[in-house]
Image (cartoon, grey):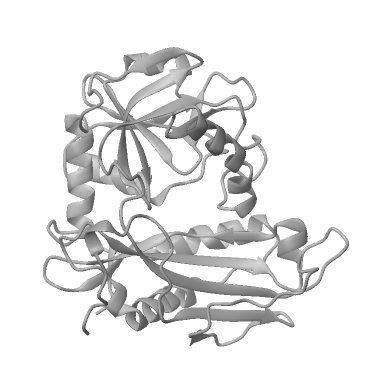
Amino acid sequence: MEKKNIDWANIGFGYIQTDYRYVSQYKDGAWDEGALITDPTITLSECACVLQYAQTCFEGLKAYTTEDGHIVAFRPDLNAERMMNSAAGLEMPPFPKERFIDAVQKVVEANAAYVPPYGSGASLYLRPYMFGFNSVIGVKPATEYQFRIFATPVGPYFKGGAKPITIRVSDFDRAAPRGTGHIKAGLNYAMSLHAIVDAHNQGFDENVYLDPGTRTKIEETGGANLIFITKDNKVVTPKSSSILPSITRRSILQAARDYLGLETEEREILLEEVKDFAECGLCGTAAVISPVGKIVDHGNEICFPSGMEKMGPVTQKLYDTLTGIQMGRIKAPEGWIKVIQ
């Protein structure tokens, strides 16, 4: 299939409408068979549950053109499982795993002309999402839902690409200990909007949130998990019940162990010990890994030895390994890559 005439190297991380999207409706206790459609608009009642009580969850994953010319998706089974967990946490009917994976395949196949070519640095971002569809005025779950997936070609999440960013310790809390921080609910991101706008206005790229109970432990940022590298090259990630279980983080930890022979650890990380790490990065579907050069805690600058010019050496190896797996340059663990075509 001939590719669309798009400047792939300069598209940035934004929405570009593609030709097809997938939609399935839940009504009377069951999901319908679902279909690809061309209309990108959604018609809702003014009293739709999603508009009144934010009953919605979503996922994010990518499709790539590999070195040998195949179009593949990265670990969609884990996105399906995580979305089922999110739905359960919001009293929504889970969309079945196999149907989720099939819908991903259909959307990517139908929009193959929008999958960026290998070597462009871009990818096709997929956004599965689900929301309460019918009218609800009392505080209760909806009884009808839509599950949808759209696709858009994207470039790097951060405009500077792999250049180290500066993040700040936020005065806001991201999630309560027994709240919704561990599920990918839209409401978690709504609460971060004021904080990220304020961070940008103050000259920072992102916020790092602390645990709301003691405000002494590192949790995650507004849109990504954190990874740290110790001075003896151990990969350490924060552990908390209110952190979103990142598929990218999980993949990085396995790649660190199995491909690079590095020791890994998931544990509570105190803010006061961050100064002792050698490297830091943000990890997630959108950015893969974005290096952090500096964390600012209310005027106190914590500068990592890896510096502000480029990724630290271990972070670079992790990035190269994971993207190599995604792009087909490195043999993937079994089940990680779903070949679309």
Q: Is residue 74 above or below residue 200?
A: below
**Residue 271 appears in the picture as rendered:** yes
Q: Residue at x 44, y 28 (%)?
A: 203
Left or right relative to 183: residue 69? left
- The residue most toward the right is 138
Left or right relative to 328: residue 99? right
Q: Residue at x 26, y 21 (%)?
A: 278
Q: Nearer the viewer, residue 23 or 94?
A: 23
Q: Is residue 316 above or below residue 114?
A: above
Q: Nearer the viewer, residue 127 or 249?
A: 127
Left or right relative to 267: residue 142? right
The mark tally for this picture is 0
**Residue 294 drawn at (x, y percent):** 35, 23
* Res. 73 image quadrant: bottom left
* Res. 301 image quadrant: top left
**Residue 258 drawn at (x, y percent):** 20, 44
Left or right relative to 177: residue 110? left
**Residue 192 drawn at (x, y percent):** 58, 40
* Res. 306 image quadrant: top left
**Residue 96 appears in the picture as rendered:** no
**Residue 262 drawn at (x, y percent):** 21, 34
Q: Quadrant of the N terminus?
A: bottom left
Q: Residue at x 24, y 80 (%)?
A: 341
Q: Is residue 160 above or below residue 91?
A: above
Q: Nearer the viewer, residue 97 or 58?
A: 58
Q: Is residue 22 above or below residue 136?
A: below
